[in-house]
Image (cartoon, rainbow, N blue to C red):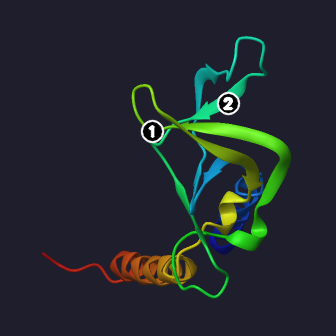
Amino acid sequence: MKFLSLLIFIFFIKISNLSAETGCNLGDDIYPDLTSEIYRDCPACAAIPVYSTSDKVHLVNTNEAACGVPRNSISYSPGGSCKVKTGPSSYASGNLNSYDPALNDCPLDSGVYVLLLIFSAVGGFSIKKLLFFPVAV
């Protein structure tokens, strides 16, 4: 029963990461935090979304062993431009794209589930041992 609940927990964690996010691609980074600010090149021009630099996702090549989203997994929005606010009144131009945040993987991340299972098993065994063989004080 405990094993089933652990499997259900891991399943829901994996399901929660299946949605794609949109961000502003500027160089080797994607900025996912949209601000409430609107930028216009001219008064009659279309509104351009503005993203903040408070958070960023790094783009990596598929053969790199580094943290980040693989470059070949992002999809660019045709004609989608955006701005990244780099200072109080300065903006950098970028391209809108969507990416899968679940692909933002570090080499260490793949071993976390194994470590979680090992520590859970050791903890469960220790508790079971204390319940059936209490230590006299």
Image quadrant where one finds the N terminus: bottom right
> Does 58 sit above or below residue 127?
above
Question: Which residue is disc 2 drawn over?
Answer: 49
Q: Residue at x 45, y 39 (%)?
A: 86
Residue type pointed to by label 2: Pro
Where residue 117 appears, x then y in whole percent? 53, 80
Count of residue discs: 2
Left or right? Give the position of 37 relative to 100.
Answer: left
Question: Which residue is disc 1 drawn over?
Answer: 86
Image quadrant where one finds the C terminus: bottom left
Q: What element carries label 1?
A: loop
Q: Residue at x 77, y 19 (%)?
A: 45
- Quadrant housing residue 27: bottom right
* Badge number at residue 133: none
Where residue 34 appears, x then y in whole percent? 61, 34
Where residue 68 appears, x then y in whole percent? 57, 69
**Which of 5 and 78 lies nearest the eye of the viewer?**
78
Left or right? Give the position of 31 relative to 53.
Answer: right
Among the two numbered marks 2 and 1 on one chain, the one whose residue lies closer to the N terminus: 2
Q: Which residue lies furthest to the left in this view?
A: 137
Q: What element carries label 2?
A: strand
Q: Residue at x 66, y 74 (%)?
A: 3
Where residue 9 appears, x then y in whole percent? 66, 61
